[in-house]
Amino acid sequence: KAGVTQTPRYLIKTRGQQVTLSCSPISGHRSVSWYQQTPGQGLQFLFEYFSETQRNKGNFPGRFSGRQFSNSRSEMNVSTLELGDSALYLCASSGEDWRVSRYTDTQYFGPGTRLTVL
Amino acid sequence: AQTVTQSQPEMSVQEAETVTLSCTYDTSESDYYLFWYKQPPSRQMILVIRQEAYKQQNATENRFSVNFQKAAKSFSLKISDSQLGDAAMYFCAYKSVNDMRFGAGTRLTVKP
């Protein structure tokens, strides 16, 4: 199976702009999670989508939003970009519903999108 | 809130030797999973090993094994016969139904 793919891989924006990042999960996976990775804050959970519904949300401002489509592909949007939004944004997919199968909820990561805000 | 702590920012090991990376976590939940992920420089994060909290047996994957102490909330990773390709950032992670958290990471250097 193909792995998790993210587009674009690199992005440069200026303050105040908005940006949309895309993530295609592993075929058959229904859960997609987004993370922000920075040298100072490490890996921080943004949100998780499962079957087009947001299942969990991290502690980020409302400028960060996401959605998931019926084919499980997901997009993340950041509006009114700030310098501090510069980071590597990682997407991860997993294939099982924790509450149904009790199977591992192992997440498989994409290569990330490196966003630079100038 | 659940926290994951990796107390060793950097570790170094000689090729072919064994190294243990530490991880502790805090939770009030009884049902969760623990993971170790590896992130080589400028490369993709990949799963190294996982442990279900309800299993007492420690997980093992080839040269990688864990020491899971549920009562102590400790989850260390042992890498045996270290190889140059093991050099990377290693992240300990905790996942429950409503939460996913990562530790700050441990940078492992492997010396030839």
Image (cartoon, coloured by chain):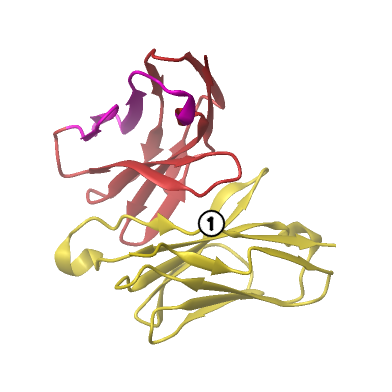
Chain colours: A yellow, B red
Q: Is residue B53 left or right of residue A61?
A: left
Which residues make up the magenta segment? B58-85
Q: Residue at x 31, y 33 (%)?
A: B73
User: Front-most of B24 and B10?
Assistant: B10
Q: As displayed, is residue A16 above or below residue B92? A: below
Q: As displayed, is residue B97 above or below residue B111? A: below
Q: As displayed, is residue A14 above or below residue B96? A: below
- The image position of residue A2, as x and y in percent, is 38, 65
The part of the image, by quadrant, that contains residue B3 is top left
Element assignment for label 1: loop
- The image position of residue A72, as x and y in percent, is 39, 79
**Would residue B63 be counted in the magenta stretch?**
yes
Q: Residue at x 45, y 65 (%)?
A: A33
Q: Name the amino acid, label 1.
A: Pro
Q: As displayed, is residue A51 above or below residue B106? A: below
Q: Quadrant of the C terminus of chain A?
A: bottom right
Q: Residue at x 40, y 20 (%)?
A: B82
Q: Is residue B42 left or right of residue A116?
A: left
- The image position of residue B19, as x and y in percent, is 40, 18
Q: Residue furthest bottom?
A: A70
Q: Chain of mark 1?
A: A
Q: Which residue is mark 1?
A: A111
- The image position of residue A86, as x and y in percent, is 73, 58
Q: Quadrant of the N terminus of chain A?
A: bottom left
